[in-house]
Amino acid sequence: MIGQSMTQQFDTQPTLFLGHGGGPLPLLDHAGHAELVRTWAPDLPIHAALHDRSVTTIVVISAHHESRDASVHVMADAAPGLLFDYSGFPPQSYEYTISNPGAPAVATRIVELLTGAGIPSALERGRGHDHGVFVPLMGLQVTTARPELPVVSVSLRGPVDYRAGEPQLTESHWAMGLALAPLRSEGVLLVGSGNTYHGRATPAEAAGFDTFLRSLGDTGPSALRRWAEHPAARGCHPRPEHLLPLLVCAGAASTSTQVESMPHDFMGHAASHFIFR
């Protein structure tokens, strides 16, 4: 763990990009999320990576954590709460709690790495984990099986809209990943939380885009920077925030030689998780 002797050796962690579904629906037995939830099963790779005992901290880059400027915000609370950033769901979905602490030392390390790479960043307190963080961690039983495991939330680099242009959005988040890559050898599991489909495209268009993404991943992490070349890219992502965590994870795993995708149905549209080793 960060703060321990620098001579201690850690396994190099994979990086994960997870589809987190819609609001709290994966936790509510929603039929449109059944296949996504099945990909979180204990006998599958995502669950195994999150529950690996060599992981000392989980850092989540959430699609729902956007900074309003060109900086990256890193939650530094020692005991973060939850941010119920959704509406119109059953009462129990506003009563969730988790016990996982924050990791102020890891948050400080993240800011140091980003700043050292020329990426403006700042510590943030009092926001709480949004559903892009707590829903997948609850669904994957991290919050119950490992309540002592620290979790840190990291924002996207704003402003997140197409006025900046796809190349700039892609490269700025790829650069974030490159800067955070050393954490993989420091006991930290980097998790991008979003969805490869989050738009208005038809099921056929979403299937074509998902196949394109997986074919890019098969070529290597860097190839995913070409995501916007597909004609359905903007239809699948009218705003790019749900795909940008994938670019951060790919950047952090830029030297990885093994990229595994896990396709699944997401409310009638094709989507995929990615694991970079």
Image: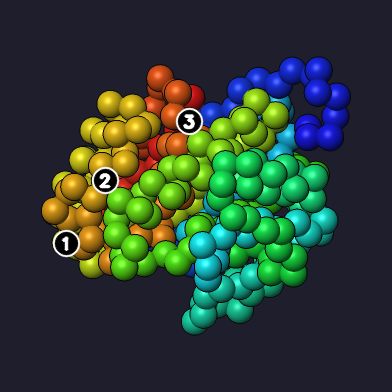
| Residue hosting label 3 | 253
Q: Is residue 115 left or right of residue 257?
A: right
Q: Residue at x 36, y 67 (%)?
A: 161
State which tag comes first along the sequence, 3 or 2.
2
Question: Which tag is nearer the camera, tag 2 or tag 1?
Answer: 2
Residue 122 seen in the figure: yes
State which tag comes first along the sequence, 2 or 1.
1
Query: Residue 35, percent across and down?
Result: 38, 48
Image quarter in which the N terminus is found: top right
| Residue hosting label 1 | 202
Q: Quadrant of residue 125?
A: bottom right
Q: Is residue 17 above or below residue 217?
A: below
**Residue at the extreme bottom:** 88
Query: Residue 194, percent across and down?
Result: 44, 54
| Residue hosting label 2 | 227
- Amino acid found under the numbered disc labelled 3: Ala
Q: Residue at x 37, y 55 (%)?
A: 169
Q: Is residue 134 above or below residue 264?
A: below
Q: Quadrant of residue 92?
A: bottom right
- Amino acid found under the numbered disc labelled 2: Trp
Density class for disc 2 (Cα within 10 Å; few <14, some 14-19, many ≥20) is many
Residue 140 seen in the figure: no
State which tag comes first along the sequence, 3 or 1.
1
